[in-house]
Image: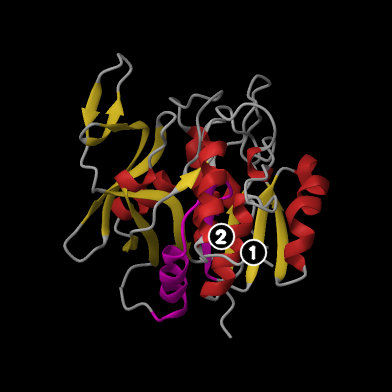
Amino acid sequence: MNKTSLVIMAAGIGSRFGGGIKQLEPLGPNGEVIMEYSIHDALEAGFNKVVFIIRKEMEDYFKEVVGNKISDICEVAYAYQNIEDLPAGFTNPAERKKPWGTGQAILACKGIVNEPFMVINADDYYGKEGYKKVHDFLVNEQKNDKEFNFCMAGFIAKNTLSDNGGVTRGVCQVDDNNYLSDIVETSNIVKTAKGAGVQQDDGSIKEIDPNTYVSMNMWGLSASFIDVLEGGFIEFLKDPNLNTLKGEYLLPSVIGDLLKKGRASVKVLETNDKWFGVTYGEDKYSVKEEFKKLHENGVYAKTLY
């Protein structure tokens, strides 16, 4: 059996969520948190190891809510994202409060993840389709001739928006063979009468194609990619234009750079499932209703595990 890992990024601080740890907010009808559904769907698709990226100070509570339950059904490992965990020669500004982004999160998995893996966010519900498609890509031989052959679940933009405010998505350009040619991390994407748009600083809306592909940080990657992240993080921190208080080392930016240098290919696997999640505190009410419907409609059994 091929070993494949599900890597869940759960160390972020939800500044827009308002109070509590949003990754551990009980939202299912039996008090399930979102990532329990993600794990269920990933194991169903064939993944056989789960790696949680968390902050060390939340470890005991995290294991109590989720980790111990999952360790009974599959291999589990932990990686710790620490704001102070920087390469030699760099120090964290005293005023900075948030970790250094998704690139630093995956870098925390060095030595823990040594097999093909899929990355997801802890606070996003992705549906079932993406897990199956990404898993099948990772376990089948890839025939592309690039140094890195990755994949991503390509969600339709209009299926990934919140009713309660703007969201950040990686807006994708895709070639005729469904390979990613460019990705731009884009903030403040909102629902509009035409479908979707980017809210500008002055309050105006720049419309975007609601059917364009966006990334939801659901990537299929190789273990060797972690070594690339290590060197890239040093270059990121050396940038004289870096905002050391708010700048983030982001996966889409790193992968986009590999694309531009011709080192990587990224197969975009179209995913038609509708996203929901807890970007904002108000989101939790609609998310609870969505999970209730999924159980009632038989998508999930009365109890997940």
Q: Secondary structure at mark 1?
A: loop
The residue carrying pointer 1 sits among few (fewer than 14), some (14 to 19) or many (20 or more) residues within 10 Å by Cα, namely few
Q: Between 223 and 9, which is closer to the camera in this rendering?
A: 9
Task: Name which of mark 1 and mark 2 comes first in the sequence.
Answer: 2
Query: From the image, which quarter does the C terminus lie in?
Result: bottom right
The disc label shown at residue 295, or none? 2
- The image's mark for residue 118 is none
Residue occupying the point 38% across, 57% down: 273
Residue sitting at x 70%, y 32%: 20
The amino acid on which the numbered mark 1 sits, given as a three-letter code, is Lys
Q: Disc 1 to disc 2, how far (Cα)?
A: 6 Å
- In the picture, residue 169 is in which quadrant? top left
Report the label total: 2
Magenta span includes 275: no
> In front here: 292 or 96?
292
Query: Which residue of the protein is positioned furthest toward the front in this rendering?
Result: 296
**Residue position for label 1:** 302
Q: Are the residues flagged by discs 1 and 2 in contact, CB closer than 8 Å?
A: yes
* Residue displayed at 76% across by 62% down: 69
Q: Which residue range is magenta in the image?
A: 116-141
- Residue 132 vs 36, above or below: the answer is below
Q: Is residue 160 above or below residue 192?
A: below
Quadrant into which the N terminus falls: bottom right
Q: Which residue in the rendered view is the most extreme toward the bottom?
A: 1
Residue 87 drawn at (x, y percent): 63, 42
Residue sitting nearer the eye, 30 or 264: 30
* Residue 136 covered by magenta stretch: yes
Horizontal and vertical percent position of residue 100: 57, 36
The image shows residue 14, relative to residue 258, as above or below, that is above
The part of the image, by quadrant, that contains residue 223 is bottom right
| Picture quadrant of residue 2 | bottom right
